[in-house]
Image: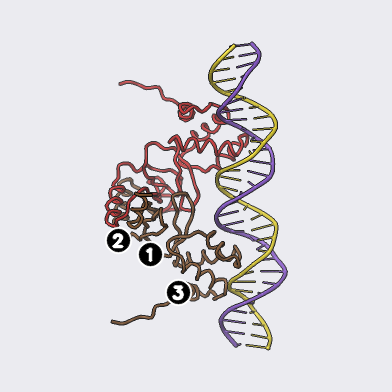
Chain colours: A brown, B red, C yellow, D purple
Amino acid sequence: MVRTRVIPLAEQLLDTLGEQGYRSTSPRKAVTQAIAAKQGHFTAEQLRQQLPGVGRATIYRSLKLLVDSGALCRVLLEDGNLHYQLSHQGHHHHLLCVECGSSQDLLGCDIEDLLRQVSAAHRFQLSGHWLEVYGRCYDCLPKAATG
Amino acid sequence: MVRTRVIPLAEQLLDTLGEQGYRSTSPRKAVTQAIAAKQGHFTAEQLRQQLPGVGRATIYRSLKLLVDSGALCRVLLEDGNLHYQLSHQGHHHHLLCVECGSSQDLLGCDIEDLLRQVSAAHRFQLSGHWLEVYGRCYDCLPKAATG
DNA sequence: ACCATAATGATACCTAGTCTCGTTTAATAT
DNA sequence: ATATTAAACGAGACTAGGTATCATTATGGT
Protein backbone atom coordinates (compact mmCIF):
# COMPACT_ATOMS: atom_id res chain seq x y z
CA MET A 1 0.00 0.00 0.00
CA VAL A 2 1.46 3.29 -1.10
CA ARG A 3 1.07 6.12 1.33
CA THR A 4 0.73 9.31 -0.68
CA ARG A 5 1.74 12.56 0.94
CA VAL A 6 -1.31 14.46 2.15
CA ILE A 7 -1.18 17.87 0.57
CA PRO A 8 -2.95 20.41 2.76
CA LEU A 9 -6.10 21.56 1.08
CA ALA A 10 -5.13 25.20 0.83
CA GLU A 11 -1.97 24.25 -1.03
CA GLN A 12 -3.96 22.04 -3.34
CA LEU A 13 -6.23 24.91 -4.25
CA LEU A 14 -3.28 27.20 -4.85
CA ASP A 15 -1.65 24.53 -7.00
CA THR A 16 -4.81 24.23 -9.07
CA LEU A 17 -4.48 27.90 -9.87
CA GLY A 18 -0.75 27.55 -10.47
CA GLU A 19 -1.34 24.83 -13.04
CA GLN A 20 -3.41 27.27 -15.01
CA GLY A 21 -0.69 29.90 -14.99
CA TYR A 22 -2.05 32.05 -12.18
CA ARG A 23 0.44 33.48 -9.72
CA SER A 24 0.65 32.50 -6.13
CA THR A 25 0.07 35.80 -4.37
CA SER A 26 -0.44 36.45 -0.72
CA PRO A 27 -4.11 37.47 -1.06
CA ARG A 28 -4.73 34.22 -2.91
CA LYS A 29 -2.98 32.29 -0.17
CA ALA A 30 -5.21 33.97 2.39
CA VAL A 31 -8.32 33.12 0.39
CA THR A 32 -7.41 29.49 -0.19
CA GLN A 33 -6.52 29.05 3.47
CA ALA A 34 -9.79 30.53 4.58
CA ILE A 35 -11.66 28.25 2.21
CA ALA A 36 -9.71 25.19 3.31
CA ALA A 37 -10.65 25.90 6.92
CA LYS A 38 -14.37 25.95 6.10
CA GLN A 39 -16.68 23.03 6.50
CA GLY A 40 -19.60 22.92 4.15
CA HIS A 41 -20.71 25.85 2.11
CA PHE A 42 -20.01 29.53 2.57
CA THR A 43 -20.75 32.85 0.92
CA ALA A 44 -18.42 35.38 -0.63
CA GLU A 45 -19.53 37.76 2.07
CA GLN A 46 -18.47 35.42 4.87
CA LEU A 47 -15.08 35.14 3.28
CA ARG A 48 -14.87 38.88 3.03
CA GLN A 49 -15.62 39.38 6.72
CA GLN A 50 -13.06 36.80 7.59
CA LEU A 51 -10.39 38.48 5.46
CA PRO A 52 -10.74 42.20 6.02
CA GLY A 53 -7.26 42.74 4.61
CA VAL A 54 -8.19 41.35 1.21
CA GLY A 55 -10.04 43.56 -1.23
CA ARG A 56 -13.56 42.75 -2.27
CA ALA A 57 -12.69 42.46 -5.94
CA THR A 58 -9.86 40.06 -5.19
CA ILE A 59 -12.13 37.76 -3.24
CA TYR A 60 -14.67 37.62 -6.04
CA ARG A 61 -11.91 37.17 -8.60
CA SER A 62 -10.39 34.29 -6.65
CA LEU A 63 -13.75 32.58 -6.22
CA LYS A 64 -14.39 32.87 -9.93
CA LEU A 65 -11.02 31.37 -10.79
CA LEU A 66 -11.58 28.49 -8.42
CA VAL A 67 -15.05 27.83 -9.78
CA ASP A 68 -13.80 28.00 -13.37
CA SER A 69 -10.99 25.62 -12.53
CA GLY A 70 -13.48 23.19 -11.02
CA ALA A 71 -12.09 23.32 -7.49
CA LEU A 72 -15.19 25.03 -6.14
CA CYS A 73 -18.81 24.82 -7.14
CA ARG A 74 -21.70 27.14 -6.54
CA VAL A 75 -24.77 25.97 -4.70
CA LEU A 76 -28.04 27.79 -4.43
CA LEU A 77 -29.67 27.72 -1.01
CA GLU A 78 -33.37 27.68 -0.30
CA ASP A 79 -33.34 31.36 0.59
CA GLY A 80 -32.00 32.15 -2.87
CA ASN A 81 -28.50 32.93 -1.66
CA LEU A 82 -25.51 31.77 -3.62
CA HIS A 83 -22.95 29.77 -1.68
CA TYR A 84 -19.71 28.08 -2.59
CA GLN A 85 -18.27 24.76 -1.58
CA LEU A 86 -15.42 22.47 -2.42
CA SER A 87 -16.19 20.38 -5.42
CA HIS A 88 -14.90 16.87 -5.09
CA GLN A 89 -16.11 15.46 -8.37
CA GLY A 90 -17.52 16.47 -11.71
CA HIS A 91 -21.17 17.29 -12.16
CA HIS A 92 -23.24 16.01 -9.29
CA HIS A 93 -25.89 17.13 -6.84
CA HIS A 94 -25.92 17.89 -3.15
CA LEU A 95 -27.94 17.01 -0.14
CA LEU A 96 -27.71 20.31 1.70
CA CYS A 97 -28.36 20.29 5.41
CA VAL A 98 -30.35 23.37 6.31
CA GLU A 99 -29.37 22.91 9.95
CA CYS A 100 -25.58 22.70 9.98
CA GLY A 101 -24.69 23.70 6.44
CA SER A 102 -22.95 20.45 5.62
CA SER A 103 -23.52 18.76 2.33
CA GLN A 104 -23.34 15.24 1.01
CA ASP A 105 -22.55 14.60 -2.62
CA LEU A 106 -25.02 12.62 -4.61
CA LEU A 107 -22.89 10.50 -6.89
CA GLY A 108 -23.96 7.91 -9.40
CA CYS A 109 -27.64 8.43 -8.85
CA ASP A 110 -30.26 7.95 -11.47
CA ILE A 111 -31.55 11.47 -11.77
CA GLU A 112 -29.80 12.20 -15.03
CA ASP A 113 -31.26 9.06 -16.55
CA LEU A 114 -34.70 9.98 -15.41
CA LEU A 115 -34.35 13.49 -16.80
CA ARG A 116 -33.21 12.09 -20.13
CA GLN A 117 -36.25 9.85 -20.33
CA VAL A 118 -38.66 12.57 -19.33
CA SER A 119 -37.15 15.06 -21.77
CA ALA A 120 -37.34 12.58 -24.60
CA ALA A 121 -40.99 11.96 -23.79
CA HIS A 122 -41.59 15.71 -24.12
CA ARG A 123 -39.54 15.91 -27.32
CA PHE A 124 -37.25 18.26 -25.44
CA GLN A 125 -33.53 18.42 -26.17
CA LEU A 126 -31.90 18.41 -22.75
CA SER A 127 -28.89 20.65 -22.38
CA GLY A 128 -28.52 21.08 -18.65
CA HIS A 129 -30.21 21.15 -15.31
CA TRP A 130 -29.90 22.47 -11.81
CA LEU A 131 -30.93 20.47 -8.78
CA GLU A 132 -30.46 21.17 -5.11
CA VAL A 133 -31.92 19.03 -2.36
CA TYR A 134 -32.63 20.48 1.07
CA GLY A 135 -33.22 18.75 4.37
CA ARG A 136 -31.45 17.57 7.51
CA CYS A 137 -28.46 15.33 7.77
CA TYR A 138 -28.48 12.39 10.15
CA ASP A 139 -26.50 14.28 12.79
CA CYS A 140 -28.99 17.12 12.82
CA LEU A 141 -32.18 15.07 13.09
CA PRO A 142 -32.12 15.04 16.92
CA LYS A 143 -31.68 18.83 17.01
CA ALA A 144 -34.71 19.31 14.79
CA ALA A 145 -36.80 16.91 16.87
CA THR A 146 -35.99 18.32 20.30
CA GLY A 147 -35.15 21.92 19.43
CA MET B 1 -71.02 19.35 -22.90
CA VAL B 2 -71.01 22.44 -20.77
CA ARG B 3 -69.26 25.39 -22.26
CA THR B 4 -67.77 27.40 -19.43
CA ARG B 5 -67.17 31.06 -19.97
CA VAL B 6 -63.53 31.72 -20.74
CA ILE B 7 -62.32 34.22 -18.20
CA PRO B 8 -59.48 36.28 -19.65
CA LEU B 9 -56.28 35.47 -17.88
CA ALA B 10 -55.68 38.97 -16.57
CA GLU B 11 -59.07 38.94 -14.90
CA GLN B 12 -58.36 35.54 -13.41
CA LEU B 13 -55.18 36.84 -11.84
CA LEU B 14 -56.97 39.88 -10.48
CA ASP B 15 -59.70 37.65 -9.09
CA THR B 16 -57.13 35.50 -7.36
CA LEU B 17 -55.98 38.60 -5.54
CA GLY B 18 -59.54 39.67 -4.88
CA GLU B 19 -60.32 36.37 -3.21
CA GLN B 20 -57.59 37.08 -0.75
CA GLY B 21 -58.97 40.47 0.12
CA TYR B 22 -56.64 42.55 -2.01
CA ARG B 23 -58.10 45.52 -3.85
CA SER B 24 -58.43 45.75 -7.56
CA THR B 25 -56.42 48.86 -8.33
CA SER B 26 -55.43 50.21 -11.70
CA PRO B 27 -51.70 49.49 -11.26
CA ARG B 28 -52.62 45.90 -10.43
CA LYS B 29 -54.79 45.70 -13.52
CA ALA B 30 -51.90 46.93 -15.60
CA VAL B 31 -49.56 44.37 -14.09
CA THR B 32 -51.92 41.43 -14.50
CA GLN B 33 -52.64 42.43 -18.08
CA ALA B 34 -48.96 42.67 -18.90
CA ILE B 35 -48.39 39.24 -17.35
CA ALA B 36 -51.34 37.72 -19.17
CA ALA B 37 -49.92 38.95 -22.47
CA LYS B 38 -46.58 37.22 -21.85
CA GLN B 39 -45.66 33.83 -23.14
CA GLY B 40 -43.25 31.87 -21.04
CA HIS B 41 -41.17 33.40 -18.33
CA PHE B 42 -40.24 37.00 -17.72
CA THR B 43 -38.33 39.11 -15.23
CA ALA B 44 -39.53 41.85 -12.93
CA GLU B 45 -37.33 44.20 -14.91
CA GLN B 46 -39.04 43.36 -18.21
CA LEU B 47 -42.36 44.10 -16.61
CA ARG B 48 -41.01 47.35 -15.31
CA GLN B 49 -39.84 48.48 -18.72
CA GLN B 50 -43.18 47.55 -20.17
CA LEU B 51 -45.06 49.53 -17.55
CA PRO B 52 -43.18 52.77 -17.03
CA GLY B 53 -46.24 54.29 -15.39
CA VAL B 54 -46.23 51.76 -12.57
CA GLY B 55 -43.84 52.24 -9.68
CA ARG B 56 -41.04 49.80 -9.09
CA ALA B 57 -42.22 48.90 -5.60
CA THR B 58 -45.72 48.21 -6.86
CA ILE B 59 -44.45 45.80 -9.48
CA TYR B 60 -42.41 43.86 -6.95
CA ARG B 61 -45.29 43.92 -4.49
CA SER B 62 -47.72 42.58 -7.07
CA LEU B 63 -45.34 39.83 -8.13
CA LYS B 64 -44.91 38.80 -4.53
CA LEU B 65 -48.67 38.65 -3.97
CA LEU B 66 -49.16 36.57 -7.09
CA VAL B 67 -46.39 34.18 -6.13
CA ASP B 68 -47.72 33.86 -2.59
CA SER B 69 -51.20 33.19 -3.93
CA GLY B 70 -49.83 30.47 -6.19
CA ALA B 71 -50.77 32.15 -9.46
CA LEU B 72 -47.14 32.70 -10.42
CA CYS B 73 -44.02 30.74 -9.68
CA ARG B 74 -40.40 31.71 -9.73
CA VAL B 75 -37.95 29.94 -11.98
CA LEU B 76 -34.22 30.23 -11.91
CA LEU B 77 -32.52 30.43 -15.28
CA GLU B 78 -29.14 29.04 -16.18
CA ASP B 79 -27.58 32.49 -15.99
CA GLY B 80 -28.71 32.76 -12.38
CA ASN B 81 -31.47 35.26 -13.12
CA LEU B 82 -34.79 34.95 -11.41
CA HIS B 83 -37.80 34.81 -13.71
CA TYR B 84 -41.53 34.45 -13.15
CA GLN B 85 -44.13 32.45 -14.99
CA LEU B 86 -47.73 31.41 -14.71
CA SER B 87 -48.10 28.46 -12.44
CA HIS B 88 -50.73 26.04 -13.64
CA GLN B 89 -50.44 23.43 -10.94
CA GLY B 90 -48.98 22.81 -7.53
CA HIS B 91 -45.35 21.89 -7.06
CA HIS B 92 -43.80 20.71 -10.28
CA HIS B 93 -40.76 21.27 -12.45
CA HIS B 94 -40.18 22.91 -15.79
CA LEU B 95 -38.52 22.14 -19.04
CA LEU B 96 -37.24 25.60 -19.86
CA CYS B 97 -36.42 26.33 -23.48
CA VAL B 98 -33.28 28.44 -23.61
CA GLU B 99 -34.13 29.44 -27.18
CA CYS B 100 -37.66 30.84 -27.02
CA GLY B 101 -38.25 31.10 -23.29
CA SER B 102 -41.25 28.79 -23.32
CA SER B 103 -41.64 26.17 -20.66
CA GLN B 104 -43.36 22.84 -20.35
CA ASP B 105 -44.57 21.62 -17.01
CA LEU B 106 -43.29 18.31 -15.78
CA LEU B 107 -46.22 16.75 -14.05
CA GLY B 108 -46.51 13.39 -12.42
CA CYS B 109 -42.94 12.45 -13.02
CA ASP B 110 -40.91 10.22 -10.78
CA ILE B 111 -38.29 12.65 -9.61
CA GLU B 112 -39.77 13.12 -6.16
CA ASP B 113 -39.86 9.36 -5.65
CA LEU B 114 -36.28 9.04 -6.71
CA LEU B 115 -35.22 11.85 -4.38
CA ARG B 116 -37.02 10.21 -1.50
CA GLN B 117 -35.22 6.94 -2.13
CA VAL B 118 -31.83 8.56 -2.50
CA SER B 119 -32.31 10.68 0.62
CA ALA B 120 -33.32 7.66 2.64
CA ALA B 121 -30.23 5.84 1.48
CA HIS B 122 -28.14 8.75 2.78
CA ARG B 123 -30.11 8.90 6.03
CA PHE B 124 -31.10 12.40 5.04
CA GLN B 125 -34.45 13.90 6.00
CA LEU B 126 -35.73 15.50 2.82
CA SER B 127 -37.50 18.81 3.29
CA GLY B 128 -37.43 20.36 -0.16
CA HIS B 129 -35.68 20.64 -3.48
CA TRP B 130 -35.19 22.87 -6.44
CA LEU B 131 -34.92 21.53 -9.95
CA GLU B 132 -34.82 23.33 -13.26
CA VAL B 133 -34.22 21.63 -16.58
CA TYR B 134 -32.75 23.54 -19.52
CA GLY B 135 -32.72 22.70 -23.19
CA ARG B 136 -34.61 23.27 -26.41
CA CYS B 137 -38.24 22.64 -27.11
CA TYR B 138 -39.31 20.76 -30.21
CA ASP B 139 -40.14 23.93 -32.10
CA CYS B 140 -36.72 25.37 -31.49
CA LEU B 141 -34.66 22.35 -32.52
CA PRO B 142 -34.49 23.39 -36.19
CA LYS B 143 -33.32 26.88 -35.21
CA ALA B 144 -30.55 25.45 -33.11
CA ALA B 145 -29.48 23.06 -35.88
CA THR B 146 -29.39 25.59 -38.73
CA GLY B 147 -28.70 28.81 -36.83
C1' DA C 1 18.86 43.19 -9.05
C1' DC C 2 15.81 44.30 -12.89
C1' DC C 3 11.87 44.24 -15.57
C1' DA C 4 7.42 43.20 -17.74
C1' DT C 5 3.13 42.29 -16.53
C1' DA C 6 -0.18 39.94 -13.57
C1' DA C 7 -2.55 41.02 -9.65
C1' DT C 8 -4.11 44.11 -6.27
C1' DG C 9 -7.19 47.43 -3.64
C1' DA C 10 -9.77 51.75 -3.56
C1' DT C 11 -13.49 53.35 -5.32
C1' DA C 12 -17.13 54.18 -8.55
C1' DC C 13 -20.63 51.90 -10.44
C1' DC C 14 -24.42 48.57 -11.38
C1' DT C 15 -28.50 45.47 -10.80
C1' DA C 16 -32.09 43.77 -8.32
C1' DG C 17 -34.71 44.45 -4.80
C1' DT C 18 -36.59 46.54 -0.08
C1' DC C 19 -38.11 50.33 3.02
C1' DT C 20 -40.15 54.75 4.29
C1' DC C 21 -43.37 57.98 4.09
C1' DG C 22 -46.48 61.44 2.51
C1' DT C 23 -50.29 61.18 -1.01
C1' DT C 24 -53.95 58.93 -3.55
C1' DT C 25 -57.68 55.79 -4.24
C1' DA C 26 -60.94 51.84 -3.74
C1' DA C 27 -64.47 49.98 -1.15
C1' DT C 28 -67.62 50.58 2.40
C1' DA C 29 -70.84 53.13 5.32
C1' DT C 30 -73.89 56.91 5.43
C1' DA D 1 -73.98 60.88 -4.01
C1' DT D 2 -70.72 61.74 -0.40
C1' DA D 3 -67.75 60.94 3.39
C1' DT D 4 -64.58 57.93 5.52
C1' DT D 5 -60.61 55.24 6.12
C1' DA D 6 -57.42 51.76 5.48
C1' DA D 7 -55.14 49.82 1.60
C1' DA D 8 -52.30 50.83 -1.97
C1' DC D 9 -49.53 53.93 -4.32
C1' DG D 10 -45.04 56.27 -6.23
C1' DA D 11 -40.82 58.77 -5.37
C1' DG D 12 -36.82 58.14 -3.83
C1' DA D 13 -33.49 56.68 -0.22
C1' DC D 14 -31.27 52.69 0.84
C1' DT D 15 -29.17 47.89 0.81
C1' DA D 16 -26.81 43.65 -0.79
C1' DG D 17 -24.13 41.48 -3.82
C1' DG D 18 -21.32 41.88 -7.42
C1' DT D 19 -18.52 44.17 -11.56
C1' DA D 20 -15.41 47.70 -13.90
C1' DT D 21 -11.70 51.02 -13.86
C1' DC D 22 -7.29 52.28 -13.00
C1' DA D 23 -3.19 53.78 -10.64
C1' DT D 24 -0.04 51.13 -7.71
C1' DT D 25 2.30 46.93 -6.08
C1' DA D 26 4.35 42.43 -6.12
C1' DT D 27 5.61 38.17 -8.60
C1' DG D 28 8.42 35.23 -11.36
C1' DG D 29 11.65 35.01 -15.06
C1' DT D 30 16.01 36.57 -16.55
Residue B141 visible somewhere in the drawing: no
Mark 1–mark 3 Cα distance, whole angstroms, equals 17 Å
Q: Is residue B122 left or right of residue A40?
A: left
What residue sits right under mark 1 in the picture? A90
Q: The disc labelled 3 sits on which kind of residue?
A: Gln
At mark 2, the secondary structure is loop
Q: Position of residue A59 (x, y in %)?
A: 56, 65
- First in sequence, mark 2 or 3: give its number: 3
- Mark number for residue A108? 2
Badge 2 and badge 3 both on one subunit: yes
Compared to A89, does A8 lie above or below?
below
Foreground label between 2 and 3 = 3
The disc, 2 or 1, on the residue closer to the chain's N-terminal end is: 1
Does residue A71 appear left or right of residue B125 in this picture?
A: right
Q: Residue at x 33, y 53 (%)?
A: A142
Tell which subunit mark 3 falls on: A
10 Å crowding of disc 1: few (<14), some (14-19), many (20+): few
Name the residue rendered at 45%, 74% in the picture.
Answer: A12
Residue B125 horizontal/vertical position (percent): 32, 51
Q: Nearer the viewer, mark 1 or mark 3?
A: 3
- Chain letter for mark 2, please: A
Quarter of the image with the N terminus of chain A in it: bottom left
- Residue B114 spot, x, y in % from top left: 28, 51
Q: Residue at x 57, y 75 (%)?
A: A25
* Amino acid at circle 1: Gly
Q: For mark 3, what is the residue? A: A12
Q: Is residue A24 above or below residue B92?
A: below
Q: Earlier in the sequence, mark 1 or mark 3?
A: 3
Say which of A75 and A91 sits in front. Answer: A75
